């Protein structure tokens, strides 16, 4: 296993306004990507990756938040941000990227991306669609990609609100809602709220699964498949909690700074 250097990220108190909302629902959809489900903890995700790809090259990426006392940057302990697994040669490869929410809430899987490259052995579009539908059921929407280079199938978590623009001409309808584990990663959600494209309570945002079958323009053979599923209903409240924690620590640190230090002799 290889571990990357820690990535540091700071957040302002103003981020709390964007991330306000109720606590997230505990249930995640029952979709899986090679056994990995939204809502899994890191140990469960590692076990699923190992079961699917025991010989894959695994890389852990960590992240670290910092806040300021007005003079110095103060770091919080680093946390597991992403597990990346890759295997196979360039023209016939598989890559898995599993992202986790940040503390102080329980760390859970909030995004899974799987990319299959099949240039050496492309799959007929009809067979690819049949395979995807057999696993996940009939998608809510199927939209063509630009220039006739494949399509996007999209599934939504039932009982919740689809976040983003669902118009067939919109790119939002061709992707899973973007999520991150840093508060600055949710600017898109704020834009959606202002356009009335997302609920005020972020925990009501539907999780989404998108499968992109990639062909050459006008071709009937799939040369790449990209699976993406995200859970904004947990990710956004988790970032709200992280932003609040940082803001509270910053207020305390600034107060301590103002009350410390010996005045010079005059």
Image (spheres, grey):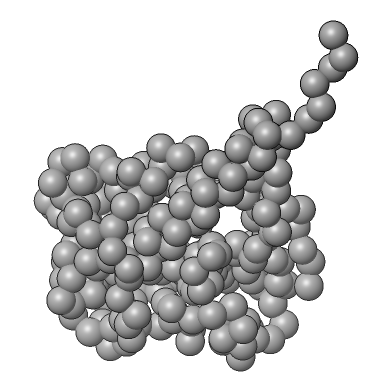
* Image-quadrant location for residue 212: bottom left
- How many marks the image carries: the answer is 0
Residue at the image point whose x is 69% and y is 77% from the top = 56
Q: Is residue 156 above or below residue 46?
A: above
Left or right of residue 2: residue 106: left
Residue at the image point whose x is 85% and y is 9% from the top = 266
> Which residue is most to the bottom?
51
Query: Foreground residue, 135 or 266?
Result: 266
Residue 190 appears at what percent x and percent y?
A: 29, 43
Left or right of residue 9: residue 129: left
* Image-quadrant location for residue 26: bottom left
Q: Is residue 148 above or below residue 100?
A: above
Residue 214 appears at what percent x and percent y?
A: 37, 60
Residue 175 appears at what percent x and percent y?
A: 31, 57
Query: Foreground residue, 200 or 6?
Result: 200
Query: Foreground residue, 215 or 56?
Result: 56
Residue at the image point whose x is 23% and y is 75% from the top = 157
> Which residue is most to the top?
266
Residue 39 appears at what percent x and percent y?
A: 43, 78
Quadrant containing the N terminus in the rendered view: bottom right
Q: Is residue 220 visible?
A: no
Q: Is residue 109 visible?
A: yes
Q: Is residue 150 above or below residue 120?
A: above
Residue at the image point whose x is 66% and y is 40% from the top = 256
> Which residue is most to the front?
266
């Amino acid at each position: 296993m290889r571990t990357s250097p820690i990535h540091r990220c700071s957040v302002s108190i103003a981020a709390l306004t964007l991330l306000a909302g109720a606590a997230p629902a505990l249930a995640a959809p029952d979709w899986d990507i090679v056994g990995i489900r939204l809502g899994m903890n890191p140990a469960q995700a590692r076990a699923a990756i190992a079961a699917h790809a025991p010989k894959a090259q695994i890389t852990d990426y960590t992240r670290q938040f910092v806040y300021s006392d007005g003079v110095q940057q103060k770091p919080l302990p680093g946390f597991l941000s992403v597990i990346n697994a890759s295997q196979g040669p360039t023209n016939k490869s598989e890559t898995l990227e599993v992202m986790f929410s940040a503390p102080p809430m329980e760390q859970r899987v909030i995004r899974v991306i799987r990319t299959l490259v099949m240039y050496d052995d492309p799959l007929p579009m009809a067979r690819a669609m049949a395979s995807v539908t057999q696993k996940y059921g009939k998608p809510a929407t199927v939209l063509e990609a630009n220039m006739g280079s494949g399509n996007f199938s999209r599934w939504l978590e039932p009982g919740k609100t689809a976040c983003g623009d669902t118009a067939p001409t919109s790119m939002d309808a061709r992707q899973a809602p973007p999520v991150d584990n840093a508060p600055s990663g949710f600017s898109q959600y704020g834009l959606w709220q202002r356009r009335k494209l997302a609920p005020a309570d972020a925990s009501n945002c539907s999780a989404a699964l998108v499968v992109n079958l990639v062909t050459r323009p006008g071709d009937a053979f799939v040369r790449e498949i990209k699976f993406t599923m995200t859970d904004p209903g947990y990710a956004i409240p988790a970032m709200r909690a992280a932003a609040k924690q940082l803001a509270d620590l910053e207020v305390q640190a600034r107060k301590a700074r103002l009350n410390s230090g010996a005045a010079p002799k005059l």
